[in-house]
Image (tube, helix red, strand yellow):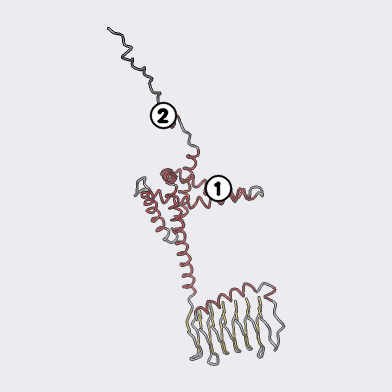
Amino acid sequence: MRRHVVAAVALALVVIAAVAAPAVAASSPRGTSGSDRIISVTGDIDVQRGELVHGPVATADGDVRIAGTVTDYVIVGEGDLVVSGRVTRGVVVIHGDARITGRVRGDVVALTGRVIVTSDGSVGGDVVSRRDPQVARGTVDGEVRRVDLRAIFTGIIIGSLAYLWIAVTISMAILGLAFVGMLPRAADTAAAAGRRIAASFGWGALVGVVGPMATALVLVTIVGIPLGLAMLSALNVLAPLGYVTAALVIGRLWVRGTTTGARLGAFFAGFGVLRLLALIPGLGFVVWIVVCIYGLGAVSMAAWHGGHRVRDDTDEPPIEPPAPVTEPAPDPVDAPIG
């Protein structure tokens, strides 16, 4: 039954968000012969005794009174609901109370208010109420329980943050493996540049802070839109690469060596420290920003100096001197006889 409650809440949000559309807001002429649906943005809704509605009844702001029959969901955004007739599916009240003196075959949900079921009413599903529900004995076939919105929202936030942490950890680990394993010399160069901490932060601020500002100015002009988009794409790649480089620099404090195993060990040592810091509420985001700026500066310095490195004469391979030419020894036959 809990899945039915979730489905009803989801349907409520969808219907209330769609009430502004003319095609949804329109309804058939009402009367004793029935109508397809009744959906209102503001205002009360009354389903008279003997009236039959073959679709949902919903209002974003207003009270709803059901004395007739509704063969679909009844959804109330801001207001109270009174059911003295019959609803063949569930009812949901987002902000208000629900009073049932008739018959509801599905669930009755009051997200922020109270559910009241009198001795004349009956509910075929569950009763879920934010405030203490008032239910007469033997009128509810399902469960009667309170809903803790704070716990629900807290669980959603924690679940989203956990998913984000896992996704970032896996993606950064793959990027680090590719960077350290496939480009070992570039990784060593970036790690060496990262030893200059002040310069790394300066370069990182220049590229990571001034760069987006310049990109915004470029995007203002129509001609510069392709260049601006290219700059934004480059920053999206360089920021994770800076995080990976910072992890390698930190890991080099404990793991040294020039082998592939040493590089990977250093990366995962620093990476583990950074991912543990990311679990601390509030501190994780700050660490991410600082580390990305620092690593971005180290990568930028390594790329700059690598592209502008001038080879001097000592870098040329030594020239081998020519082999000495020796005169052939005289033939013993031609030697003078003494």
Residue 95 vs 276, above or below: the answer is below
Residue 145 vs 205, above or below: the answer is below
Q: Residue at x 42, y 27 (%)?
A: 319
The image position of residue 156, as x and y in percent, is 48, 69
**Quadrant holding the C terminus:** top left
The image position of residue 284, as x and y in percent, is 44, 58
Q: Which mark is residue 318?
A: 2
Horizontal arrangement in the rendering, residue 204 relative to residue 39 (left or right): left
The image position of residue 31, as x and y in percent, is 71, 87
Depth check, front residue: 259 or 168: 259
Depth check, front residue: 295 or 309: 309
Q: Residue at x 54, y 83 (%)?
A: 108
Q: Residue at x 56, y 75 (%)?
A: 10
Q: Dot 1 corresponds to which residue?
A: 211
Viewer can see residue 145: yes
Callout 1 secondary element: helix
- Can you tell which of label 1 and label 2 is closer to the viewer? 2
Q: Residue reaching furthest left?
A: 338
**How many numbered marks does the figure carry?**
2
The image position of residue 101, as x and y in percent, is 57, 89
